[in-house]
Image (cartoon, rainbow, N blue to C red):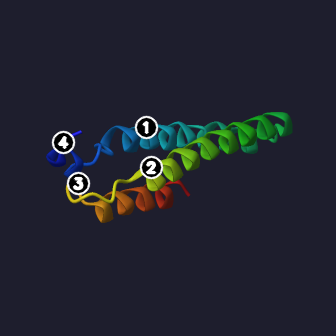
Amino acid sequence: MSVIANLFGHSPIRPMQQHMKAAVHCAREVLPLVEAMVEGDLPAISACRARIDSLEHRADELKNEIRSHLPQRLFMAMERRDLLEIGRASCRERV
């Protein structure tokens, strides 16, 4: 790889999009959970909770993977600090 190519890191945009999609999938499961709670359907509540836990875990894995593989090189598609802030914001909004 050339010296010029070494200055540029891989774009973090696609992994961040995957993380955001995983967070959206997780958030979409909240309404069925609330509906099951309103109905008092304990098996459905348990199933919804398990799906949410699984989806949230996947989103967390993606987020951690993004953080650990962010290049420390001179140039990226966006600033490292901005990317980390987007990740923190998407986690806060999930709650």
- Residue wearing tag 3: 78
Q: Which of 66/19 is in front?
A: 66
Q: Position of residue 7 (x, y in %)?
A: 20, 52
Q: In the rendered structure, which disc, 2 or 1, sits on the residue that comes first in sequence?
A: 1
The residue lying at 68 percent from left, 40 percent from top is: 54
Residue type at mark 2 is Ile
Q: Is residue 78 left or right of residue 34?
A: left
- Residue wearing tag 2: 66
Classify mark 2: helix, strand or loop.
helix
Q: In the rendered structure, which disc, 2 or 3, sits on the residue that comes first in sequence?
A: 2
Residue found farthest to the front: 2
Residue type at mark 1 is Gln
Rendered position, 12 above or below 83 = above
- Is disc 1 surrounded by few (<14), some (14 to 19) or many (20+) residues within 10 Å? some
Distance from the alpha carbon under mark 4 to that under mark 2: 25 Å
Distance from the alpha carbon under mark 1 to that under mark 4: 29 Å
Q: Position of residue 90 (x, y in %)?
A: 44, 54
Q: In the rendered structure, which disc, 1 or 3, sits on the residue that comes first in sequence?
A: 1
Q: Position of residue 1 (x, y in %)?
A: 24, 39
Q: In the rendered structure, which disc, 1 or 4, sits on the residue that comes first in sequence?
A: 4
Q: In the rendered structure, which disc, 4 or 2, sits on the residue that comes first in sequence?
A: 4
The residue lying at 20 percent from left, 55 percent from top is: 75
- Residue wearing tag 1: 18
Which quadrant is the C terminus positioned in? bottom right
Q: Which mark is residue 2?
A: 4
Distance from the alpha carbon under mark 2 to that under mark 3: 13 Å
